[in-house]
């Protein structure tokens, strides 16, 4: 059965919402890790991980709301992510943030690979998706680099 343009647009919105939720979870984990680090390591985490992930979150939300507005579709309100358990180590928090960022990237990549963003003919959408993925692209490598120096 052929998919309508409205169904394709809604599928894209759902993928962006899923990605934004995962990015929000990554932010919550990074915030908690920040609180548990010494000042120097926390500053490094903020610069190398938190800021790019925060930018990706804002861009994902903006892409979602602008795309929905352009086509008269309902936009979603994004709830704050839950706070991680206080017993988790910094290493576990960073691993969770990396996993959440990877899930967000997979959701967006799947949407891009489906060619739906091209089919709906929306260059702003495609640019937004690409920007979010670019911001998330180095999260794992940066987290690993930070972990090599934490606790030393």
Image (cartoon, rainbow, N blue to C red):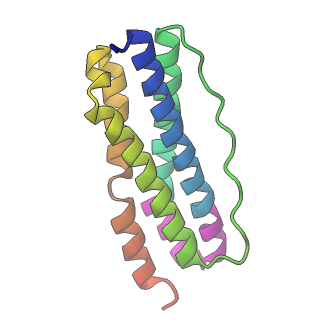
Query: Looking at the figure, which quarter contains the N terminus?
Result: top left
Residue 35 to residue 75: above or below: below
The location of residue 129, given as percent across then percent down, is 36, 34
Q: Residue drawn 49% across and 70% down? A: 95
- Can residue 46 be seen in this snapshot? no
Residue 102 to residue 74: above or below: below
The location of residue 29, given as percent across then percent down, is 60, 62
Residue 148 to residue 57: above or below: below
The location of residue 24, given as percent across then percent down, is 58, 48
Q: What is the number of callouts on the image?
A: 0
- Can residue 113 be seen in this snapshot? yes
Q: Residue drawn 48% across and 91% down? A: 152
Task: State which region is magenta.
Answer: 31-49
Question: Position of 12 compared to 126: left or right?
Answer: right
The location of residue 65, given as percent across then percent down, is 53, 22
Q: Quadrant of residue 4?
A: top left
Q: Quadrant of residue 37?
A: bottom right
Dominant secondary structure of the residues highlighted in magenta in the image: helix
Q: Is residue 129 magenta?
A: no
Residue closest to the far top: 72
Residue 90 versus residue 76: which sits nearer the camera?
76
Residue 53 versus residue 71: which sits nearer the camera?
71
Q: Quadrant of residue 111?
A: top left
Residue 110 versus residue 125: which sits nearer the camera?
110
């Amino acid at each position: 059965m052929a998919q309508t343009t409205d169904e394709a647009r809604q599928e894209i919105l759902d993928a962006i919402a899923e990605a934004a939720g995962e990015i929000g979870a990554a932010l919550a984990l990074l915030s908690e890790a920040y609180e548990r680090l010494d000042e120097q390591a926390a500053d490094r985490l903020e610069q190398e991980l938190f800021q790019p992930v925060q930018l990706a979150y804002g861009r994902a939300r903006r892409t979602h709301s602008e795309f929905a507005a352009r086509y008269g579709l309902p936009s979603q309100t994004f709830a704050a992510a839950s706070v991680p358990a206080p017993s988790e180590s910094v290493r576990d928090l960073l691993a969770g943030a990396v996993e959440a960022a990877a899930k967000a990237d997979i959701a967006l990549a799947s949407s891009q690979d489906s060619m739906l963003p091209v089919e709906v003919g929306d260059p702003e959408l495609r640019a937004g998706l690409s920007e979010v993925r670019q911001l998330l692209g180095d999260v794992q490598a940066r987290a690993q680099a930070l972990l090599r120096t934490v606790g030393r």
